[in-house]
Image: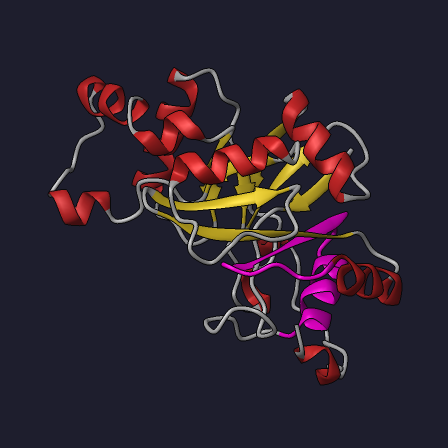
Amino acid sequence: MSLIDLHTHTRHGSVCGYMWSDELVERAKSIGLDGVCITEHDSFWSSERIRRLAEKHEFPVIGGAEITSDCGDVLVFGLDKLPLNVSSIREIRKRVDDAGGVMIAAHPFRGLAASAGIREITTALVDRLVESPLVQHVHELEVLNGASGAWERRLARAVAGRTGRIGTGGSDAHGIMMVGACYTRFENEISSEETLVQALRDGRFTAADNLVYRQPLAKQPVTDRTESRM
């Protein structure tokens, strides 16, 4: 079994991130995670940088990205690059499929309640969202997101359940205190991007949360800021 945080951001690749990669990995280790995915906004770490970070800490680190599509944000694994002018959800899915990767809707339906004035989760609402381009083009939905409220989580679970998807978990951490707030529990050992993608495709996982709140904040190491170059 492996506990993996599928959704994190650092100062190295996300302007909204405020933790260094060393802080991220050390925090993940200290709270009992078995690996962590770095999913910067619209940018990918090189496989060499991922390898160096993993070897430095002797801990599984997996690369991915959070891509801004025309239908919402999606986490992608199995790709190493994507042209900046590609935003179509259909085109992103095609490129992910061509690479044998996986695409997950990140924090789906965020802001829907506020923007549309929706307060109830009805059958009609779930049916409408099931047919949306975002849900139709992803492999999975992130049903537990560390920055999402209870209403959004319930709605994501309802839509995932209606489509037969399992649902993933990720902290969406931008700082060390949120690492592990939500994560995904895999049946198999996850040690690389390849094993992660295969496990996601096989459906051998469940979403989980609250790991971070059971652990104290450990003393963080001095950060190696030379890693700041992409």
Check the image and report above or below for 221 versus 85. below
Say which residue appears at 73% left-offset and 63% top-offset: 25
Question: The C terminus is located in which quarter?
Answer: bottom right
Say which residue appears at 68% left-offset and 44% top-offset: 4
Query: Furthest residue to the left?
Result: 117
Say which residue appears at 16% left-offset and 37% top-offset: 119
Q: Looking at the picture, how far across and down is residue 57, in whole percent?
A: 85, 64
Q: Looking at the picture, how far across and down is residue 224, in whole percent?
A: 76, 82
Question: The N terminus is located in which quarter?
Answer: top right
Check the image and report above or below for 221 versus 202. below
Q: Is any part of residue 18 visible from this angle?
A: yes
Q: Looking at the picture, how far across and down is residue 102, in whole percent?
A: 59, 34
Q: How is the image coloured?
A: secondary structure
Check the image and report above or below for 29 versus 5. below
Question: In the rendered picture of this protein, how many numbered marks are placed on residues?
Answer: 0
* Left or right for 88, reference 8: left
* Left or right for 67, reference 200: left
Q: Is any part of residue 218 visible from this angle?
A: no
As for residue 14 lying within the magenta part, the answer is: no
Nearest the viewer among 83 and 144 is 83
Residue 100 is drawn in which quadrant?
Answer: top right
Say which residue appears at 65% left-offset and 68% top-offset: 217
Q: In the image, which residues are magenta?
A: 20-46
